[in-house]
Amino acid sequence: MVLFALIGLLALTPSGCSESKPLAKQTKPSQQKMVKQEPVKQKPVTASLSSEPSTQEDSTADPQSNLKPKIDAQSQTSESASTANDQPESPDQPTIEIGAQWTRLSKSREIWIDKKSKQVMFTGIVCLNDGPLEMFICPARTKEHESVIAANCLAKEVHFALVLAKVNPGQPCSWDPNYRPAHGPTIEATLKWQDKATQKTKSQNAKQWIRNIKTKKAMEEKWIFGGSTFWTDPDTNEEFYYADAGELICLSNFSTAMIDVGVESSQANNGLLYETFNENIPEIGTKVYVILQAGPPVEPENKSDKKADGKGAEPPVVDNSPDTQAAKAPPKANGK
């Protein structure tokens, strides 16, 4: 017992205690240098109609067109999906073959030009295949109730494309004091679409989709690129292209029309000249490719309508006809 007590006593002496090592000196965490990072620029997701990359044509229009600078400036804003007409994004896949001769002008719009042949092509959707007509083509979400095709672009974008293709407008129709038809280049429209039953591409002259109400025969009259005009809001100085409200290609006379029919054609219900040629039009919702080709110009009835230098007409008066008396306010995207 004494021996065990002695051993325990020795264990409590300082010489028997195990020395604990001091804690290691903690180093301060290294200070990270603040590096300024540039934000990642993401490319907008846009639809592509063909396998070729979309390009913006860097072209200068013919100086004869007095509307080109205005349309050029406004067309740049149409690259975004949101526009004055709140147009939907273009579909991802083509339904017909797009040849290499076509140059796409917009990433968010399906609109092309072929400079060599002076043609313009854009897409639309069949929106009416049974009923009387005041328009043949209107921009989407404007006048689908009286048009066969709702275009996937604005009227001013088609105007701009025609100018890039060296097709310059004349002048819209007027009633000052009497009716005078539009004058300028004639326009032929060809339609292409994929037949749902055969999955093959069909092609037809646009006039085969339009019937004269009285004769029941396909339309024979000419279309004329008059060119519409702009309206400036005096309060905001914002410019509006009148045809964007619906009058892209017309079948009744409008002094706001971009492309007008070349004969006097009333917009009154009891005076309408045209209706749908039902059996020739595919089902509603069919995607259609509209190809515009310029032809020989129609000269003005009154030679004094021309400018002295012969380079085009003076800007038209747009509120001098019965159908435009209410057009002193900006065109509405929806409705007349």
Image (cartoon, rainbow, N blue to C red):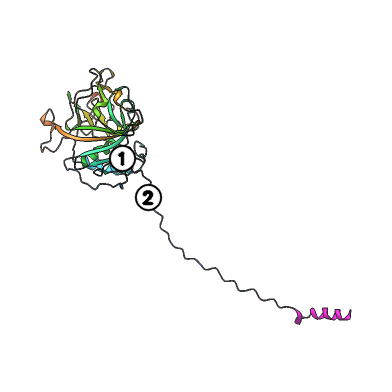
Circle 1 SS class: loop
Label annotation for residue 43: 2
- Relative to residue 131, is residue 197 depicted above or below? below
Give the quadrant of residue 131: top left
Q: Is residue 187 left or right of residue 138?
A: left
- Relative to residue 63, is residue 270 depicted above or below? above
Residue 79, position as x, y percentages in the image = 32, 43
Residue name at image x 20 percent, y 23 percent:
264
Q: Is residue 2 magenta?
A: yes
Q: Quadrant of the N terminus?
A: bottom right
Q: Which residue is mark 1?
A: 110
Q: Is residue 10 left or right of residue 92?
A: right
Q: Residues within 10 Å of mark 1 (few under 14, many from 20)?
A: many
Q: What is the magenta range?
A: 1-24
Residue name at image x 19 percent, y 42 percent:
116
Q: Residues within 10 Å of mark 2 (few under 14, many from 20)?
A: few
The type of residue carrying mark 2 is: Lys
